[in-house]
Amino acid sequence: MANPPFKAYLFDLDGTLIDSVELILQSYRHTVKTHLGKVPPDERWLAGMGTPLLKQLGEFSDDPEVIEAMLLTYRAYNNQHHDDMVTVFPGAVAAVRTLSSWGVKLGVVTSKARSGAQRGLRVCGLDDLFPVLVGVDDVERPKPDPSPVLHAIEQLGVAPSETLFIGDSAHDMAAGRAAGVSTAAALWGPIERHVLELYEPDYWLENPGDVVSLPLPTKTD
Protein backbone atom coordinates (compact mmCIF):
# COMPACT_ATOMS: atom_id res chain seq x y z
CA MET A 1 0.00 0.00 0.00
CA ALA A 2 1.49 3.33 -1.05
CA ASN A 3 -0.17 5.32 1.71
CA PRO A 4 -1.02 3.22 4.80
CA PRO A 5 -3.59 4.90 7.05
CA PHE A 6 -1.23 4.72 10.05
CA LYS A 7 2.51 4.86 10.61
CA ALA A 8 2.32 2.48 13.57
CA TYR A 9 0.13 -0.47 14.50
CA LEU A 10 -0.03 -1.74 18.05
CA PHE A 11 -1.63 -5.06 18.95
CA ASP A 12 -2.86 -6.58 22.17
CA LEU A 13 -1.72 -10.20 22.46
CA ASP A 14 -4.16 -12.65 24.06
CA GLY A 15 -7.50 -12.71 22.28
CA THR A 16 -6.18 -10.48 19.50
CA LEU A 17 -3.10 -12.06 17.93
CA ILE A 18 -3.02 -15.41 19.71
CA ASP A 19 -5.91 -17.65 20.70
CA SER A 20 -5.09 -18.45 24.31
CA VAL A 21 -8.56 -17.94 25.73
CA GLU A 22 -9.30 -21.60 26.52
CA LEU A 23 -5.87 -21.99 28.14
CA ILE A 24 -6.53 -18.88 30.24
CA LEU A 25 -9.96 -20.11 31.30
CA GLN A 26 -8.70 -23.59 32.15
CA SER A 27 -5.86 -22.10 34.18
CA TYR A 28 -8.36 -19.90 36.03
CA ARG A 29 -10.77 -22.75 36.73
CA HIS A 30 -8.00 -25.03 37.99
CA THR A 31 -6.54 -22.32 40.21
CA VAL A 32 -9.75 -21.10 41.81
CA LYS A 33 -11.07 -24.62 42.39
CA THR A 34 -7.75 -25.69 43.91
CA HIS A 35 -7.65 -22.82 46.39
CA LEU A 36 -11.29 -21.89 46.95
CA GLY A 37 -13.13 -25.12 46.22
CA LYS A 38 -15.55 -23.78 43.62
CA VAL A 39 -15.35 -21.83 40.38
CA PRO A 40 -17.48 -18.76 39.61
CA PRO A 41 -18.79 -18.32 36.03
CA ASP A 42 -16.23 -17.73 33.28
CA GLU A 43 -17.79 -14.33 32.65
CA ARG A 44 -16.28 -13.06 35.89
CA TRP A 45 -12.78 -13.87 34.66
CA LEU A 46 -13.42 -12.64 31.14
CA ALA A 47 -14.49 -9.25 32.51
CA GLY A 48 -10.95 -8.77 33.80
CA MET A 49 -9.11 -9.94 30.70
CA GLY A 50 -6.64 -7.32 29.57
CA THR A 51 -5.57 -6.51 33.12
CA PRO A 52 -2.61 -8.04 35.00
CA LEU A 53 -3.00 -11.55 36.42
CA LEU A 54 -2.27 -10.44 39.97
CA LYS A 55 -5.10 -7.92 39.83
CA GLN A 56 -7.52 -10.52 38.49
CA LEU A 57 -6.64 -13.02 41.21
CA GLY A 58 -7.06 -10.29 43.81
CA GLU A 59 -10.77 -10.28 42.98
CA PHE A 60 -11.07 -13.69 44.66
CA SER A 61 -9.28 -13.11 47.96
CA ASP A 62 -8.10 -10.36 50.29
CA ASP A 63 -5.32 -12.53 51.73
CA PRO A 64 -1.90 -11.77 50.14
CA GLU A 65 -0.65 -15.28 50.92
CA VAL A 66 -3.64 -16.88 49.23
CA ILE A 67 -3.26 -14.60 46.22
CA GLU A 68 0.44 -15.46 45.93
CA ALA A 69 -0.33 -19.18 46.16
CA MET A 70 -3.00 -18.80 43.49
CA LEU A 71 -0.54 -16.96 41.28
CA LEU A 72 1.95 -19.84 41.53
CA THR A 73 -0.74 -22.42 40.80
CA TYR A 74 -2.03 -20.48 37.80
CA ARG A 75 1.43 -20.01 36.31
CA ALA A 76 2.38 -23.66 36.82
CA TYR A 77 -0.75 -24.91 35.06
CA ASN A 78 -0.48 -22.32 32.30
CA ASN A 79 3.20 -23.05 31.65
CA GLN A 80 2.59 -26.79 31.54
CA HIS A 81 -0.14 -26.56 28.91
CA HIS A 82 0.87 -23.39 27.06
CA ASP A 83 2.56 -24.71 23.92
CA ASP A 84 -0.08 -27.39 23.32
CA MET A 85 -3.06 -25.06 23.64
CA VAL A 86 -1.98 -21.68 22.27
CA THR A 87 -2.56 -21.07 18.57
CA VAL A 88 -2.50 -18.05 16.30
CA PHE A 89 -5.81 -16.68 15.04
CA PRO A 90 -6.36 -17.53 11.36
CA GLY A 91 -5.12 -14.70 9.17
CA ALA A 92 -3.18 -12.92 11.90
CA VAL A 93 0.30 -13.83 10.67
CA ALA A 94 -0.53 -12.88 7.09
CA ALA A 95 -2.05 -9.57 8.18
CA VAL A 96 0.94 -8.61 10.32
CA ARG A 97 3.38 -9.62 7.59
CA THR A 98 1.46 -7.45 5.13
CA LEU A 99 1.72 -4.49 7.51
CA SER A 100 5.43 -5.17 7.90
CA SER A 101 5.88 -5.20 4.12
CA TRP A 102 4.42 -1.69 4.01
CA GLY A 103 7.22 -0.45 6.22
CA VAL A 104 4.97 0.63 9.09
CA LYS A 105 6.10 0.29 12.70
CA LEU A 106 4.75 -2.57 14.77
CA GLY A 107 4.42 -3.26 18.47
CA VAL A 108 2.64 -5.43 21.02
CA VAL A 109 1.07 -3.97 24.17
CA THR A 110 -0.03 -6.61 26.67
CA SER A 111 -0.84 -7.02 30.34
CA LYS A 112 1.10 -10.27 30.29
CA ALA A 113 4.64 -10.50 31.63
CA ARG A 114 7.27 -9.96 28.97
CA SER A 115 8.62 -13.52 29.14
CA GLY A 116 5.16 -15.05 28.70
CA ALA A 117 4.36 -12.71 25.84
CA GLN A 118 7.59 -13.60 24.06
CA ARG A 119 6.78 -17.28 24.45
CA GLY A 120 3.33 -16.85 22.95
CA LEU A 121 4.69 -14.88 20.00
CA ARG A 122 7.35 -17.52 19.40
CA VAL A 123 4.91 -20.45 19.52
CA CYS A 124 2.65 -18.68 17.01
CA GLY A 125 5.41 -17.65 14.58
CA LEU A 126 5.11 -13.94 15.30
CA ASP A 127 8.29 -13.31 17.27
CA ASP A 128 10.23 -11.82 14.35
CA LEU A 129 7.59 -9.24 13.47
CA PHE A 130 7.41 -6.94 16.49
CA PRO A 131 10.47 -4.85 17.35
CA VAL A 132 8.63 -3.31 20.31
CA LEU A 133 6.96 -5.32 23.06
CA VAL A 134 5.51 -3.67 26.16
CA GLY A 135 4.55 -6.08 28.94
CA VAL A 136 3.14 -5.56 32.40
CA ASP A 137 6.65 -5.54 33.87
CA ASP A 138 7.68 -2.62 31.64
CA VAL A 139 5.32 -0.04 33.14
CA GLU A 140 4.14 1.06 36.57
CA ARG A 141 0.48 1.36 35.54
CA PRO A 142 -0.92 -1.31 33.21
CA LYS A 143 -3.98 -1.12 30.96
CA PRO A 144 -6.57 0.38 31.15
CA ASP A 145 -4.13 3.17 32.05
CA PRO A 146 -2.67 4.69 28.86
CA SER A 147 0.93 4.25 30.07
CA PRO A 148 1.68 1.01 28.15
CA VAL A 149 0.37 2.46 24.88
CA LEU A 150 2.27 5.72 25.38
CA HIS A 151 5.42 3.76 26.23
CA ALA A 152 5.11 1.80 23.00
CA ILE A 153 4.61 4.82 20.74
CA GLU A 154 7.51 6.58 22.42
CA GLN A 155 9.76 3.62 21.58
CA LEU A 156 8.46 3.58 18.02
CA GLY A 157 8.95 7.32 17.61
CA VAL A 158 5.45 8.12 16.40
CA ALA A 159 2.64 10.44 17.46
CA PRO A 160 -0.69 9.21 18.86
CA SER A 161 -2.49 10.50 15.75
CA GLU A 162 -0.26 8.25 13.62
CA THR A 163 -1.05 5.11 15.62
CA LEU A 164 -3.73 2.43 15.68
CA PHE A 165 -4.19 0.10 18.65
CA ILE A 166 -5.99 -3.20 17.96
CA GLY A 167 -7.41 -5.09 20.92
CA ASP A 168 -10.25 -7.33 22.02
CA SER A 169 -11.04 -6.05 25.51
CA ALA A 170 -12.61 -3.02 27.12
CA HIS A 171 -9.28 -2.36 28.83
CA ASP A 172 -7.56 -2.15 25.44
CA MET A 173 -10.12 0.32 24.16
CA ALA A 174 -9.92 2.44 27.31
CA ALA A 175 -6.11 2.52 27.25
CA GLY A 176 -6.02 3.47 23.59
CA ARG A 177 -8.66 6.14 23.97
CA ALA A 178 -6.84 7.68 26.94
CA ALA A 179 -3.54 7.63 25.02
CA GLY A 180 -5.07 9.53 22.10
CA VAL A 181 -4.51 6.83 19.50
CA SER A 182 -7.10 5.39 17.14
CA THR A 183 -8.63 2.13 18.34
CA ALA A 184 -9.88 -0.97 16.56
CA ALA A 185 -11.99 -3.62 18.28
CA ALA A 186 -11.14 -7.23 17.43
CA LEU A 187 -14.45 -9.05 17.31
CA TRP A 188 -12.88 -12.52 17.04
CA GLY A 189 -11.84 -12.30 20.71
CA PRO A 190 -13.95 -13.48 23.67
CA ILE A 191 -15.53 -10.12 24.54
CA GLU A 192 -18.95 -9.38 23.08
CA ARG A 193 -19.49 -6.36 20.87
CA HIS A 194 -22.01 -4.66 23.17
CA VAL A 195 -19.32 -4.42 25.87
CA LEU A 196 -16.82 -2.81 23.52
CA GLU A 197 -19.41 -0.39 22.09
CA LEU A 198 -19.29 1.55 25.36
CA TYR A 199 -15.73 2.64 24.44
CA GLU A 200 -16.61 3.81 20.93
CA PRO A 201 -13.74 2.23 18.98
CA ASP A 202 -12.84 3.97 15.73
CA TYR A 203 -12.93 0.71 13.77
CA TRP A 204 -14.63 -2.68 14.04
CA LEU A 205 -12.66 -5.67 12.75
CA GLU A 206 -14.49 -8.91 11.96
CA ASN A 207 -11.26 -10.84 11.34
CA PRO A 208 -7.50 -10.12 11.49
CA GLY A 209 -7.31 -9.52 7.74
CA ASP A 210 -9.55 -6.47 8.04
CA VAL A 211 -6.66 -4.49 9.53
CA VAL A 212 -4.98 -4.18 6.12
CA SER A 213 -8.02 -2.63 4.42
CA LEU A 214 -8.92 0.22 6.78
CA PRO A 215 -9.75 3.71 5.50
CA LEU A 216 -7.75 6.76 6.48
CA PRO A 217 -8.60 8.08 9.97
CA THR A 218 -10.67 11.19 10.25
CA LYS A 219 -9.70 12.32 13.74
CA THR A 220 -6.62 14.34 14.68
CA ASP A 221 -4.78 15.18 17.93
Image (spheres, rainbow, N blue to C red):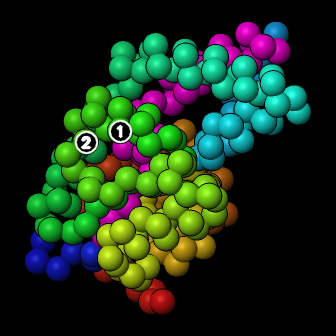
Please state the horizontal and vertical placement of residue 106, each as a whole percent of the image. Answer: 28, 61
Name which residue type carries label 1.
Answer: Gln
Report the residue that reaches farthest toward the right. 62
Q: CA distance from mark 1 to mark 2?
A: 7 Å
Instruction: Choose top left, top right, bottom left or bottom right for residue 134.
Output: bottom left
Q: Is residue 214 left or right of residue 22?
A: left
- Residue 43 coordinates in the image, percent (x, y): 70, 33
Is residue 215 something that shows in the picture? no
Q: Which secondary structure lies at badge 2?
A: loop
* Residue at 29% from the left image edge and 29% from the top image edge: 123
**Residue ID for mark 2:** 127
Q: Are marks 1 and 2 in contact (CB under 8 Å)?
A: yes
Q: Position of residue 56 (x, y in %)?
A: 71, 37
75 lies above or below 168: above
Residue 89 magenta-highlighted? no
* Element on which disc 1 rests: helix
Query: Is residue 170 depicted above or below 89 in this figure?
Result: below
Going from the N terminus, do you reach mark 1 or mark 2 first? 1
Q: Of the residues shown, which amino acid type is indicated by label 2? A: Asp
Q: Residue at x 53, y 48 (%)?
A: 137
Where is 48 relative to 221, above or below? above
Q: Which residue is mark 1?
A: 118
Magenta-drawn segment: 8-36
- Relative to 182, 59 lies left or right: right
Observer-nearest residue: 44 or 156? 156
**206 left or right of 130 in image:** right
Residue 130 seen in render: yes
Q: In the image, is residue 28 part of the stretch drawn in magenta?
A: yes
Horizontal placement of 44 versus 92: left or right? right
- Place of residue 48 in the rendered image (x, y in percent of width and height, measured from the top left): 68, 42
Q: Quadrant of the N terminus?
A: bottom left
The residue drawn where x is 58% and y is 67% is: 146
